[in-house]
Amino acid sequence: MKAIKKKKLSEAEIRYRSLFEDSPISIWEEDFSAVYKYINSLREQGITDFKEYFSNNPDQVEKCSKLVKILSVNKSTVEMYHANSKEELLTDLKALLTKDSMKTFVEQLVLIANGGTHYEGECINKTIDGKKIDVYLQWILAKEYKKDYSVVFVSLMNITDMKNTERALEESEEKFRTISNSANDAIIMIDNSGKINFWNRAAETIFGRNSSEVIGKQLHDILAPERYINVFKKGFEKFKYTGKGNVVGKTIEIYAKHKNGTEFPIELSLTGIKLKGQWNGLGIIRDITKRKESEEENRLQKEQIKLINKILRHDLANSLAAISSAINIFKKEKDDKMLDNISNNIEKSADLIMKMKEHKFLIASTNLKIYDIDEHFKKILQNYPIIEYSIKGKCKIFADDSLNSVIDNLIRNAVVHSGTDRIDIEISSSGRTCEVKVIDYGKGIPNDIKLKIFDEGFKYGVTGHSGLGLHIVQKAVKNWGGDILTEDNSPKGSIFKLYLRKV
């Protein structure tokens, strides 16, 4: 009977040794009994918080590492640590530990102090030739040795490749995060349910929302104007299963919603990215408000130029035709009145050409300068010697090169169209505004045309020329950030009020 038991025990030992030696995982058989005794001696000295103690005394941790006896290692361990033989690994545990794995060792010491029997975690070790390896560690106390911790099995799995992949992914994510946060365009990602899972800094600026406000929330509910939501949701149902859609892979222009509720134009480029078997949406968004404003301004300017050319071609053609006719009559009849007709039409043509130049100022001007408005009125009024005038007040304003044309148009309008023989200029200021009144004492402006006098191409009566004078005035003043209004003077005449930006 004893022989049978002895045989079974021997067979069990052989199987154990076979499993130990041939395991594809690194296995260590270690003796922590000396460490156990030392920790008990520290307890007798009054140490109770072993985590704090070992954290503050790294020399004691190193001492404990030298107390561990390595009883045996298997073949996988020899290969994993680049050793030539088992004997190379049985001498000094500390030689294989790094600063990172010493932290793990401290956790094992605290475990022993608290009577623990099992530990697992990740750490970094060193091979015999000094190369660092990432390992997944399991530390198990054999039950029958719980009294003295004399047999502990430690299994180690080399996870270096996995950790390198994780680190590469983290580095890639960090690069993506850094690049995207440096971009001027909004970069936004949504998951397979339409919820936002990435929101860069430019998106915060463009939409007025921090990432903490939007991560995990439905993109369409936050950014899409109400009229788009049903269309977006219908399209997203197709996208989340196929990664395809009417706007996927394209760049489109639509409107988005700011945090304050206002809508603004954006340029959206959308693509699908498959992550973990599910389609995610990646959108690059650019605020094109300024571009659209510029496009609209260009469109209006083109329309304005077309209208100006049409008016000028028509009026110039009429003037030239009248000049040609008057010349022919003068040649035949020697009528001196025709010379006056020719002179008047030449003057009218010159006036039309000047209007064209003034419009060029309005279209091309972008830079505002500082002007003394009273000095410029004085300068222009000197060109009208038959008109009495007075100028009260001073003010510096922001305007551009069309200022002289604006003043000249106002004065010419009062002289030619209103028939005044006197003009008074009254200048006052309040806050950031300079108010300029141009007062005449002529026939005034009929009520039925007061709302039309600034319209492009509007002409009235026999003195009407191109219909551009007052339109030029209004256009220029608004370009400067100001405004112009008109009202009746009492007992007769008109008052033009200019509200300009004061320096």
Image: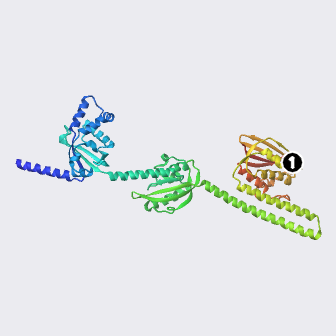
Number of other residues with Cα within 10 Å of mark 1, as a class: few under 14, some 14 to 19, many 20 or more? many
Q: Amino acid at mark 1?
A: Tyr
Q: Where 318 sits versus 67, above or below?
A: below
- Examine the rendering and report whether any part of residue 467 can be seen: no
Q: Nearer the viewer, residue 285 or 455?
A: 285
Left/right of residue 59 with respect to residue 146 in the rendered view: right
Residue drawn at (27%, 28%), measured in percent from left and top?
46
Where is residue 330, by image quadrant?
bottom right
Locate residue 322, reporting x and y percent: 86, 66
Decide if residue 163 is on the left or right side of residue 24: right
Question: With 485 as the anchor, is 231 left or right in this view?
Answer: left
The one of 49 and 39 positioned closer to us in this rendering = 39
Residue 188 visible, this angle = yes
> Measuring 49% from the left and 58% from the top, which residue is drawn there?
233
**Helix, strand or loop status at disc 1:** loop
Figure coloring: rainbow
Q: In this figure, what is the number of numbered marks?
A: 1
Q: Quadrant of the C terminus?
A: top right
- Side (left or right) of 326 relative to 44: right
Residue 365 lies, in percent from the top left, at: 71, 53
Q: Which residue is mark 1?
A: 441
Q: Which residue ends up furthest to the top in the rendered image?
A: 45
Image-quadrant location for residue 255: bottom right
Task: State the residue lying farthest toward the bottom.
Answer: 332
Relative to residue 246, is residue 212 depicted above or below? Answer: above
Q: Position of residue 32 (x, y in %)?
A: 22, 39
- Residue 359 location (% of width, % of height): 75, 57
